[in-house]
Image: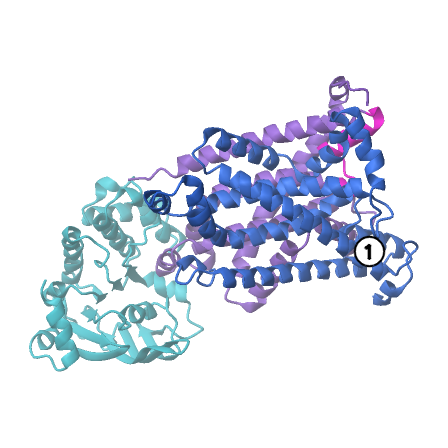
Amino acid sequence: MGGEFDWSVVWKYRAVLWDGMVTSLQLFAIALAGGIFFGTLLAMARLSRWKALSVPAAGFVNLIRAIPFIMAIFWFYFLTPMIVGKFTGQQGEAVGPFTSAIVAFIMVESAYYSEIIRAGIQSIPRGQPWAAYALGMNYWQSMGHVVLPQAFRNMLPVMLTQAVILFQDTSLVYVVALKDFLGAASKAGQLTGRIVELYLFVAVVFFVICFAASWAVKRLQARLAVPSR
Amino acid sequence: MDWKVFLEQAPSGGMTYLGWLWSGLFWTVCVSACAWVIASVVGGIVGVARTTPLGWARAAGTAYVELFRNIPLLVQMFLWYFVMPEVLPQALGDWLKQDMPHLLTLPFAAQFSLWEFTAAVLCLGLYTASRVAEQVRSGIQSLPKGQTNAGLALGLTLPQVYRHVTLPMAMRIVIPPMTSEFLTIFKNSSTALTIGVLELTAQSRQISEYTFKTFEAFTAATLIYIVITMTVILLMRTLERRVAVPGYIAQAGGH
Amino acid sequence: MTASPDPRPMIEMRQVSKWYGAFHVLKECTTKVEKGEVVVVCGPSGSGKSTLIKAVNGLEPFQKGEILVNGVSVGDPRTNLPKLRSHIGMVFQNFELFPHMSITDNLTLGQVKVLGRTRDQAVEKGLALLDRVGLLSQKDKYPGQLSGGQQQRVAIARALSMDPIAMLFDEPTSALDPEMINEVLDVMVQLAREGMTMMVVTHEMGFARKVAHRVVFMDQGSIVEDCTKDEFFGTQRSERAQLFLSKILQH
């Protein structure tokens, strides 16, 4: 190599790297929101009395959790344009790699979040929804006002930890050539030959963000554990 | 859908596409198994270190876990493959990239060498070790403190207490989460495709690129992953039953 | 105030049977509660009394028989259960206040979301009832900050805020420390004296003697005794009831 580090590449390519980071953050935010939303629905479906809901939900969750994340990305990268094409009549062009990646991430994260939320719902004593029903509430009111607020409160630390993992997993879009933070660094590295500095920079940035986030989650956990009486 | 495509001759390797799939499975299993060896040994040591009364051991263990947990696996893979040879002394770095590949001819591996394999195994192994360390640590810490005290009261030294009292029980508690980690290694092995290792996921993509039978290729790989998952779970359940301690509540049913 | 002779019973149970898998939990239970009556249901653990009372408002489904509340069939799939439940109040052994809401919000949630009252109406009603059980000062606290006895009194107020036609109590004092049992029983006695139709699963025989009109004794899923209070505490007809009473009446 020559034995010398040239960190100025990082500064020179800061615009490209920043754009990549923005893409990573967008992917993260959308996947997080979608994952929690659909994960909640999946969890409720799994706990439902109707086999027509609980069996496919369980099947979906177990299938997604049995295959590598990268395999799931490939699957949805392939399926999404196909399915959209069937509905809109056009083939392929309408759906780009970013959309396919979003779909893949939401699908995978919803499976992982549904397990967390399901555990949360099951940790609420049965008496709570009963008390809601006894007041005359229906299933959705009981879920929305009594069960889910408590379930989310209980599972908040675990959900936040999963969010940190999700942020790290956004780097996997590299396999479909999407220009996220890692992809941008990779491209800059190929252009300048300074892949060492750029990959180390990426590693440091991820470390700082994730370490700070995990530390914040631990502090939050300590605060939530304070008893009220 | 055309499932017969798997019986067609592949453009390279002197085998059918089904052969490609098997070779992918072979490398998935190899990478995962070798990485698991590293992960269990290193993870076990680091996990135990974090529970000892030695301050420096705990600090080192914590640093290890935090380092490997907060960097994405893919980034770590690139660090091992692209960055490590460059930060080593020139001669060693060059050896890794140029001479190591020729040490062994790997079967079914026309496109990658021992160097890629080693980088993948080291990366996956040391990353998973950090997760194993956490499971081992919480397994040990979940044991009642009285156990350690009872051992010490008998006159055993702390290492003896670990060897005869703590670790045997901790090992059994830790089997279910370890099963989960073992399964995760199989899934994470797919990350090696980014540095050229043709494991199962990579092969399924290759087959789809050559034959355009994407659905068949991906389904075959998915089914194989499912079979792997079920096999591992079955093996681990058998192991759990064989080493179970009679009457200990944690063993009952696993629910 | 005596039970008024309304032709239709408030709660009526005919040949109700329930199985958990192979376990026969309720065996052809038949009884009724007239309007304004207070019926105490007692019996040893596992006798099915908790299951019985939860069947009345449909929290526990049952396979055979019929339950009518104010003429409406609980087991009929066409019945609007939430609507039915909004007319019956239920008080649970573990209070089941909603821990993530303030006391006031606990009292208004059902009124606003189920009965459609405005927030102001609900708050006015809720606080009036809170005052009636002696806890107006706790209105802004959270359940976790109240003692068991206080929580149970709030739970009673919560049930009353829905203006129920009948009240069901499932072992309301069993989870309370002894010194708090009386504060809850006092509220229930007051309620009975005002003419509320009540079905109470309890071990508190003092309460039964004071305000119950009838006592129902259950054992192993069947109703073994179903008679007036005086008959029950006078000459017991069955050996099992005698045994039960002798164990309970230390208190």
Q: Was residue A188 drawn as part of the magenta stretch in this picture?
A: yes
Question: With A16 as the anchor, is B52 left or right in this view?
Answer: left
Q: Chain of mark 1?
A: A
Q: Is residue B168 above or below residue C9?
A: above
Magenta part, dominant SS = helix
Per the image, the residue denoted by label 1 is: A89
Task: Compare residues B161 and A197 and report the one nearer the observer.
Answer: B161
The image quadrant where one finds the C terminus of chain C is bottom left
- Residues packed near mark 1 inside 10 Å, few (<14), some (14 to 19) or many (20 plus): few
Of residue B35 and residue C113, the one placed in the foreground of this image is: B35
Residue A74 colored magenta? Answer: no
Q: Is residue C22 visible?
A: yes
Question: Whole-percent x and y of residue C221?
Answer: 28, 77
Q: Which residues are magenta?
A: A173-193
Which chain is tinted blue?
B
Judging by colour alone, the chain drawn in purple in this rendered image is A
Identify which residue is drawn at 74% across, 39% down.
B119
Task: Residue type at mark 1: give it.
Answer: Gly
- Res A148 visible: no
Which image quarter is the N terminus of chain C in? bottom left
Q: Residue furthest front?
A: B155
Drawing shade for chain C = cyan
Secondary element type, mark 1: loop
What is the total number of numbered labels drawn onto the structure image?
A: 1
Name the one closer to the observer, B110 or C124.
B110
